[in-house]
Image (spheres, rainbow, N blue to C red):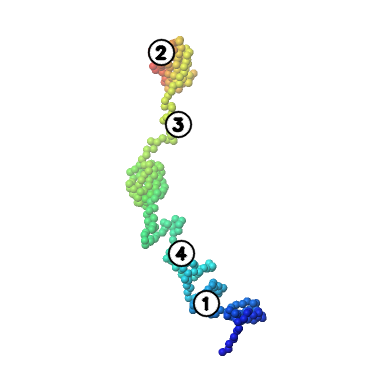
Amino acid sequence: MSEIILTKSDPPANPPAGKCAIYFKNDGRAYWLTEAGLETPFKTVGSGTGDLMSDGSVALISNWDVGAFQITALRFHSDEATLSPFTVASIAVVTNLNADLLDGQHAAEFASSTQGGTADTAVQPGDIDTLVKINASISDGPIADQAYVDNAVLGLLDHKGGYNASTNTPDLDVAPSGVLKGDAYIVTVAGLFFTEQVDIGDWMYAIVDSASTLADWTIVQANIDTTAFATSAQGALADTAVQPGDDIFVKYLSVNDQTGTNYGLVLGDAGALVTMSNAAANTVTIPTNASVAFPVGTQIDVLWIGVGATSILSDGDTVTGNLNFSTRWSAVTLIKIATTAWVVVGGTP
């Protein structure tokens, strides 16, 4: 056997280009030196100073970077209990990765591929049209299937159009067919519906499927006598008519005080009280219709106040009744009963 015996020494000078120097230093370890002066110690295999043993008896003592190389093994195991056992910089999908915890959740918390596929085709929020088309049930309780939804919404108010009660068009009371709960009609021509009189504008809607009797229908505004209501013209008059609380309900007479010996009535005296106060005899004259056209029905009160007696005269129109006053402070009423005719009420012969 050949031997190479090296003596411990200080590092030699840098070797020539393309060469390296091997030597022992005084620390008892072997080194090699490159032509650039880079000194690297030889490691004793299995000495525990960083060598990686295939039997696992020697552990790494620092981070290990294998660069762009691939490490292949039967399995990887980490005994780290708190920190992440490994980090991945890549965003590529890892094929066949089986994990028990993902974001702190066990695998059982996530949908399976079958369940996920079902979810993709399930009704989504906003799919209103689809909600009434589903027909499904689940093991732990029923959900609204298509039949349930159909029964729930079937017969809700559905305006079908007009109904001619005079000719029973469409046929609703002789041989009705296909009428559903909630079918609604508005009467366009009055007539009998079964035995009930219906008028234009009345609403009828079925309260059961296959409605075939009067009891199967609800009629809104049936049998209302339209003559009991005011016409539009009458309603307009009512708007301007005297209302409760209007002062016109209490009639206050206007007073026309006269102090002369003769006074001729004017249109402003209609509905008023004319008082006569004079020491001498005095008269109240009713003008002809040609000069002052009081409306028929005009009423004028005349009161005698002064010392001189008051009497009633006419300028030409007919005046009937007693034209004199009974005494001072008495009054008479003049009423126009025709175009040229008056009557005096309350006077004395």
Quadrant holding the C terminus = top left
Helix, strand or loop status at disc 3? helix
Q: Which residue is mark 4?
A: 104
Q: Within the image, what quadrant is residue 7 found in?
A: bottom right
Q: CA distance from mark 1 to mark 3?
A: 116 Å
First-in-chain label (2 vs 4) = 4
- Label 1 or label 4, whichever lies nearer to me, is 1
Q: Quadrant location of residue 200?
A: top left
How far across and how far down the image is residue 287, in percent?
A: 47, 17
Mark 4 or mark 3, whichever is nearer to me: 4
Q: Earlier in the sequence, mark 3 or mark 2?
A: 3
Disc assigned to residue 48: 1
- Tell which of 146 and 83 is nearer to you: 83
2 on left or right of 265: right
Which three-letter amino acid code belongs to the residue tagged 2?
Arg
x%, y% of residue 169?
Answer: 39, 47
